[in-house]
Amino acid sequence: MADLSVSYMGLKLRNPLIVASSSLTGTPAKLKRCEEAGAGAVVLKSLFEEQIEAQTAKLEREGGDYPHPEAADYLRQIGLRLNQDEYLKLVADAKANLAIPVIASLNCVSPKGWTDYAAKLAKAGADAIEVNVAIIASDFDRTAAEVEGAYLKVVEGIRAKVKLPIAVKLGPHFTSLPQTALALRRAGASALVLFNRFYQLDFDIERLALTPGYHLSSPDEIHLPLRWIAILSAQVGCDLSASTGVHDSAGLIKQLLAGAKAVQLCSTLFLKGMDRIKTMLEELGAWMERHGFATIEEFRGKMSQEKSADPLLYERLQYIKVYVGLD
Ligand SMILES: Cc1cc2nc3c(=O)[nH]c(=O)nc-3n(C[C@H](O)[C@H](O)[C@H](O)COP(=O)(O)O)c2cc1C
């Protein structure tokens, strides 16, 4: 029997499959289901900074017009605490009911407010914190360095308050991902999660209205994170976890070969159900036996750019007619 256990940010996982932050991990009952289905760890649904801001704004609206800034501040504090208390309870419940590692998730667009809260998450028992930093670089006056600096501030702020492992979940839109990845590691990230898949925007051309795009990924979306995990894994100096487009055991094996320490699943579990985890792990074990690998470390990173005899192939961006054969 192949040994599927891995170490991710210093956490011992019985296998590399993590249920990604989503409504699949939003209640104690759903979290228990993840563990029973065989997951190696869970990332709780994110506590959203925007959600707290919106809740605070609602409380302020309902609370009327306050002439004193202290009154508004007080309401803001209540708004903050309401959601945050519920979330701390979710962390504590998860820790009480699960044997697998529990990773709390904070969505951040700014460093404010979160740093003290991260310490509370640690106290509630979280094994690690995943920080989902999502800043859209749509401001014409903000340079790339300023936007990247904001990511670093979030991580530095949280690192200053907690000793827990911190994973930083990023989108793919960086001009120099290796530089940003290194800077994040130096700021205190124990792992990077590549990549978040953001809410997609679409247009309804009959109503001339904005609509949400399809919210689940397809297996075709694995290629972008696969390339970057293969390029970064040997050199970035922290663990990598794959997210987006892993729908089957082939996708899982590919990401491990690229050098990922763990692989997160979301869309495939919505589409095919939690039993998908068991199937994927069985197929991973069978593949390892077929290839003579007793542990994941024996083959992890074997197809990273660093191990390749032809590293430039990982950087190829242009199609070459002879390979595509479409014209
Ligand atoms: C319904 C839904 C809710 C999600 N909620 C969160 C969230 O709260 N926090 C987060 O970091 N990612 C969230 N995600 C993103 C997933 O964790 C994951 O990164 C993304 O779906 C890509 O992985 P996949 O291809 O396996 O679906 C959500 C995704 C879906 C589909």
Image (tube, rainbow, N blue to C red):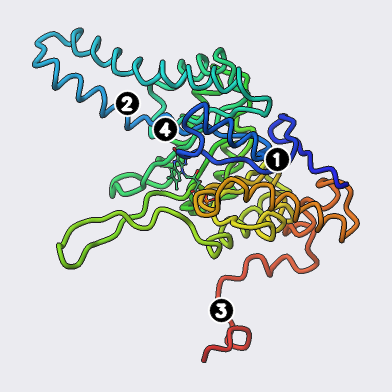
Pick whichever of labels 4 and 2 is earlier in the sequence: 2
> Up-down: is 317 above or below 283?
below
Question: For this rendering, which residue is in front, 254 or 19?
Answer: 19
Q: Which mark is residue 319?
A: 3
- Is 240 left or right of 300, judged from the image as shown? left
Question: Ligand 1 closer than 8 Å to the CB at disc 2?
Answer: no
Q: How many marks?
A: 4
Give the foreground label among 1 and 2.
2
* Real-space CA distance between mark 4 and mark 1, rounded to the nearest whole angstrom: 24 Å
Pick whichever of labels 3 and 1 is earlier in the sequence: 1
- Is 269 left or right of 75, judged from the image as shown? right
Secondary structure of the residue carrying tag 3 is loop
Query: Where residue 270 sits in the image (x, y, percent)?
Result: 50, 49
Pick whichever of labels 4 and 1 is earlier in the sequence: 4
Pick whichever of labels 3 and 4 is earlier in the sequence: 4
The kind of residue on which mark 1 rests is Gly
Question: For this rendering, which residue is in front, 203 or 173?
Answer: 203
Identify residue for label 1.
237
* Real-space CA distance between mark 3 and mark 4, rounded to the nearest whole angstrom: 37 Å
* Real-space CA distance between mark 4 and mark 2, rounded to the nearest whole angstrom: 11 Å
The kind of residue on which mark 3 rests is Tyr
